[in-house]
Amino acid sequence: MATAPHQPSRTVHRLAWLDALRGVGALAVVGEHLTTWAMPWLRPTSFNLGVYGVLVFFLVSGYIIPTSLERHGDVRAFWIGRLFRLYPLYLAVIAVVLALAWWIPIRPEVPRDGSAVAAHATMLMDAVGSAGVLNTMWTLSYEMLFYLLAVALFATGRRDRWGIVPVLFALLAAGAGLLLAGPPVVGAWPAWVSCAVFVAGLACVLAGRGGTAAVYVLGAMALALMASSRVPWFGAAMIAVMFTGTAIRRWEGGEGRLWPVGVVAVLVGSTPMWALNAGWWWVRPDRWGLTIVLAGLTFAVAMAARGRRVPAALTWLGTVSYSLYLVHLPILLVIMELVGEMRWSPLPAQLGVGAAFLAVLLPACWLSHRLVEQPLQRLGRRLTARRPVVAAA
């Protein structure tokens, strides 16, 4: 009884440190794109700032999503919440990019046929060999794969108390790097098939009919897509990172072991050393390894300090992090189109443009969060409240 009044405070602190990590991750991605274009002297080259931010995001997702799903025990509510959390702003940003296409052309990597629509409808672009209208959208593919896999594992009723799942995905990444130089399946049909399965499966879950079978089918599809994504080892590595977050959460709660975290770090960190498809500058062993170490240290430090008060600015950035992540690139593209190349401009001009970009970005993120994200999230919660709890079927 004596500890009950302090529970809300502990909850606030727990959520605050996760929000702060989201804010750090989003800022890192923004920083990668801004410095690459306007301030190359400020961009680190010993590690990839953008991938560092993505890894922090993925650790947070892995930490919070499966345990939240288990705590509420409602697959249908989970998917309603995810759909109303992710899609409104995602579709709004796509609409803005398409509306500007007469001026700023869509990336040439995006297919010019219906398969691009199918790939974007599921957010599985990277997993089906397509490309997003914004290059930041590739991370959403692996978030979605993780959700599909986490829900399928939840439906089995078993918890991965030994942390075997992230190790298996890390081993899959290591093997894929050794055996696959590219996706084993190419063409437009994976986008169409995955879209049909995705829509049909979620329809069953949301309707409460055949939900268990649908969850397993969606999980199997996620496994297949991960193994056949554009860079199979990288996709499996990202899933391993997310399930590493889950293993950390289980260890924290006294329900798991910590050793899988080290195994995954070694396997994922060393895979580029033998991967057939690892020609990017930032997956060279030294840079890739440092990126992973920094992301892990960031998460560990934040977790160790989770009982302390977090700066309000960081928690605010975490609250609007999804907007920050999706909105910053269209704004940056417009500014790039207006002012041109900035990498060799005088320092005052670079700093001025960077400050102007942030002065536009932060209010835009606040507005998109208030006007797009929050109203649709409230609608999702209302829809969830009207439905009975459904574990998987």
Image (tube, grey):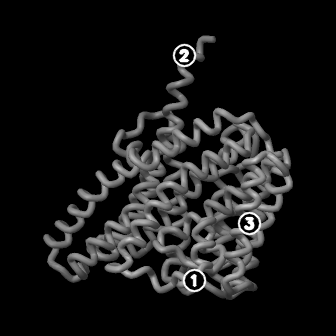
x%, y% of residue 355? Answer: 21, 61
**Which image quarter: residue 140?**
bottom right
Q: Position of residue 317 (x, y in %)?
A: 39, 48
Give the crowd class for mark 1: few <14, some 14-19, many >=20 residues within 10 Å. few
**Of marks 1 and 3, which one's residue comes earlier in the chain?**
1
Q: Closer to the camera, 146 or 78?
A: 78
Q: Amino acid at mark 1?
A: Asp
Which of the image's four quarters has the C terminus?
Answer: top right
The mark nearer the N terminus, 1 or 2, is 2
Give the distance between the C-alpha atoms of the residues marked 3 and 2, in whole angstroms.
43 Å
Where disc 1 sits, the SS reads: loop
**Which numbered marker is on residue 113?**
1
Front of the two marks 1 and 3: 1
Instruction: Provide the residue designation for mark 2.
Output: 5
Task: Give the numbered dot on residue 222.
Answer: 3
Nearest to N terminus: mark 3 or mark 2: 2
Image position of 315 (left or right of 116):
left
- Quadrant where the N terminus sits is top right
